[in-house]
Structure formats: C-alpha cells, structure tokens
Amino acid sequence: MTVLSFTAKMRVGTRQHPYDRLRFIKPVFIGDTIRVRVTIKEKRDYKQPDHGMVVKALEVFNQRGETVLACEHLLLVKRRGT
C-alpha cells in the first residue's frame, strides 16, 4: 500500500476529493512508521452561494520526523444555514 493510498483511506466520507500540489518528498520503506498531520489551511468561496471550498494541508512524516509526502486536500462543503 502506498503512502498516498493509506492517507486517502483516512478521509471521512465516500466521495472522491481532489488533491492539489501533491509532492512525494522522500521514499517510504517496508517497516517504516508514518504519521499524518492535517491542518485546515483556507476557506474559499465557491461559484454556488450555498457551498464553499475548504483546503486542508496534509503532511506525512516517517519515524525520523522527515516529511515524506505533502499535499493539499480540497473539499466542497455545503454552508450551514442555507
């Protein structure tokens, strides 16, 4: 299983959401331990007024604390109260 497929399985929900600025920085080897940090980076307006775009920064680290993968995860969300 690749690091990207592992992190993709961690997403909530069943819809496919695109990744942006995907970078594989270092290789991951059998026996490595990885951890993931997700940060809400930005909220954007969307062309439909009852929806918005949330940008999550996703970083994957190995057991030495080295970044092995970095990307942004884009989510289209329905606004509350609309």
Image (tube, grey):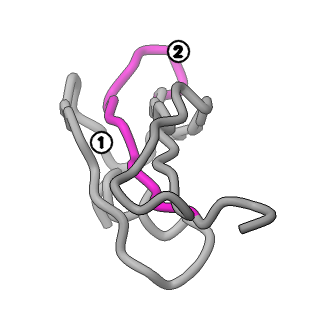
Q: Position of residue 53 (x, y in %)?
A: 46, 48
Residue 3 image label: none
Q: Quadrant of residue 60?
A: top left
The residue at 36%/37% (across/down) is 72
Residue 29 image label: 1
The answer to which of marks 2 and 1 sits earlier in the sequence is 1
Image quadrant holding the N terminus, namely bottom left
Task: Kindly indicate whether the residue at mark 1 contacts the one at mark 2 (C-beta within 8 angstroms).
Answer: no
Query: Which range of residues does the magenta coloring cover?
Result: 62-77
Residue 37 among those drawn in magenta: no
Q: Is residue 80 left or right of residue 45?
A: right
Q: Is residue 8 left or right of residue 14?
A: left
Q: Position of residue 28 (x, y in %)?
A: 30, 38
Q: CA distance from mark 2 to mark 1?
A: 14 Å
Q: Quadrant of residue 38?
A: top right
Above or below, 43 against 81 in this view is above
Return the residue nearer the eye: 20 or 24.
20
Return the residue nearer the eye: 50 or 39.
50
Principal SS element in the magenta part?
Answer: strand
Q: Amino acid at mark 2?
A: Gly
Q: Position of residue 5 (x, y in %)?
A: 34, 64
The residue at 59%/78% (across/down) is 13
Image quadrant holding the C terminus, namely bottom right
Q: Is residue 15 left or right of residue 1?
A: right
Q: Amino acid at mark 1?
A: Phe
The residue carrying mark 2 is 65
Above or below, 32 against 79 in this view is above
Element marked by disc 1: loop
Q: How many marks?
A: 2
The residue at 21%/23% (across/down) is 25
Residue 76 among those drawn in magenta: yes
The residue at 36%/65% (across/down) is 17
